Image: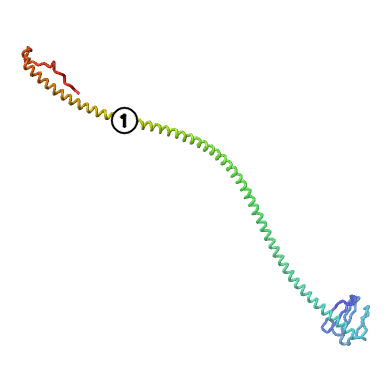
Amino acid sequence: MQTFNAYSNQQVQFYNYNNDAGAGQVAQAPQNGTTIARNPVSGGVQRDDGDQSRILKDFSSPTRLLNRYNALSGQISGVAAAVNGVKGDVANVSAQVADVRTGVTNVAADVKGVKDDVANVSSQVADVRNGVTNVAADVNGVKDDVANVSAQVADVRGGVTNVAADVSGVKDDVANVSAQVADVRGGVTNIEGKFAGVAKDIGQINKNIDTLENQAGQGQQALAGIGTRLDKIDTAVQECCGSRHSANPGATTNATRPAPVTA
């Protein structure tokens, strides 16, 4: 049985051999509707159920009725095709909805994973924040240490400056001492020169003394020879004349003998 609305929403029903109603069976029309029933046994004779507001009883124009039936049948076929298309569309939409549901499930899982990742990142950011806080504290400590070291370096620099001044003074003193040593060395050189002259003079004096000693030795030898000769002369004189003038002719005297010269 096929049912559709036509002519001011009047519901019209058609039956054929393959529909719900069997041969010789008349379909019941809904309220405020019109029922057209075809019974092959009765040859298409319509039967009035007595309860309808309008019954189609005019068979004087079967061609017009057939045309209307054919038109309605075509419309019904179009509607059935449209319904089948809608059914396919609904099935497609259902499949798409299932895909969307699966996608939403996957998205929900992904969102949960993202939520977990965000929680993990938040925890890591908290750890990083704590680490940065600790690093900041360490940097402040290093800053204080650097300031302390800077002060110590300034003190060392001042000490080095003082040492440099002292070294400069020592350098000046060393230069002064070096000049004085040079003067002393010059004086020593002069003294050495003078001592060299004195040594030369002493050497000459030594040579002169040696010469004098040689000459004195030679003079002593000459005097010794002279004394010997005088002794011989005295002896001879004594021998010759002493007997006459001396009580003791054998005695000799050295009263007139010159003393020997000694070096």
Residue 249 picture quarter: top left
Q: Position of residue 52 (x, y in %)?
A: 92, 78
Q: Secondary structure at mark 1?
A: helix
Q: Is residue 226 left or right of residue 109?
A: left
- Colour mapping used in the image: rainbow
- Inspect the image, locate mark 1, and give the three-letter code of the amino acid beneath it: Gly
Name the residue rendered at 70%, 64% in the picture.
Answer: 107
Instruction: Locate the C terminus and report the quarter of the image it occupies.
Output: top left
Q: Nearer the viewer, residue 20 or 111?
A: 111
Q: Position of residue 92 (x, y in %)?
A: 75, 72
Tag 1 residue: 197
Q: Is residue 108 left or right of residue 151?
A: right
Q: Nearer the viewer, residue 226 or 68?
A: 226
Whether residue 43 is situated above or below residue 147 in the rendered picture: below
Q: Is residue 8 left or right of residue 207?
A: right
Name the residue rendered at 62%, 47% in the picture.
Answer: 136
Q: Is residue 153 left or right of residue 236?
A: right
Whether residue 10 is situated above or below residue 117 in the rendered picture: below
Count the labels in the image.
1
Q: Nearer the viewer, residue 55 or 239?
A: 239
Q: Position of residue 35 (x, y in %)?
A: 89, 80
Whether residue 161 is situated above or below residue 133 in the rendered picture: above
Residue 31 picture quarter: bottom right
Q: Position of residue 258 (x, y in %)?
A: 15, 18
Instruction: Locate the N terminus and report the quarter of the image it occupies.
Output: bottom right
Label 1: how many Cα within 10 Å (few below 14, some 14–19, many 20+): few
Whether residue 198 is situated above or below residue 20 in the rendered picture: above
